Amino acid sequence: MQKASTRSYRCSYHPLEGEFAALCESGVLPFVQVQAQNAEEAQRLAYHITGCAISDVQRLDQSAARFA
């Protein structure tokens, strides 16, 4: 049985302030980087890690990941 390959994803999220999402004055949201088989799995992992609403999921290319 062949295991599916994983890719790197950067997931931006809205941080919590108490029970509610905090406003981000700078306009730049924090992010987590995860390894997943697809964007949907990456979003689920990011939510599990942060407990916050995920606003954006971006797949990172191999060339871009080397320079980050």
Image (cartoon, grey):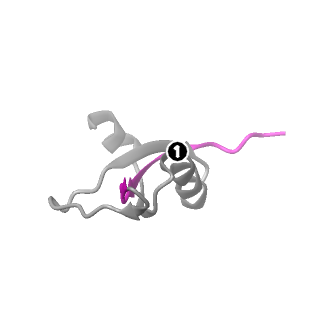
> Does 42 sit above or below residue 63?
below
Residue 7 visible (yes or no): no
> Dot 1, crowdedness within 10 Å: few (<14), some or many (≥20)?
few
Point out the image quarter for the N terminus. Answer: top right
User: Of helix, strand and loop, which one carries label 1?
Assistant: helix
Foreground of the two, 66 or 25:
25
Q: Amino acid at mark 1?
A: Ile
Q: Residue at x 22, y 57 (%)?
A: 28
What's the residue at 43%, 43% (across, down)?
33
Judged from this view, the residue extending furthest toward the top is: 66
Mark 1 = which residue? 49
Most extreme residue toward the right, as rendered?
Answer: 1
Instruction: State how many labels appear.
Output: 1
Q: From the viewer's perspective, is residue 20 above or below residue 6?
A: below
Magenta span covers which residues? 1-17
Magenta run includes residue 39: no
The picture quadrant where one finds residue 32 is: top left
Residue 9: image location, x then y, percent: 45, 49
* Left or right: where 40 falls relative to 54: right
Give coordinates of residue 26: x percent, y percent.
15, 58
* Left or right: residue 58 compared with residue 64: right
Nearer to the camera, 23 or 44: 23
Q: Residue at x 26, y 36 (%)?
A: 67
Extreme left residue here?
26
Q: Quadrant of residue 41?
A: bottom right
Q: Is residue 4 visible?
A: yes
Q: In this rendering, would 35 be left or right of 27?
A: right
* x, y percent for residue 63: 34, 41
Residue plotted at (28% across, 56% down): 29
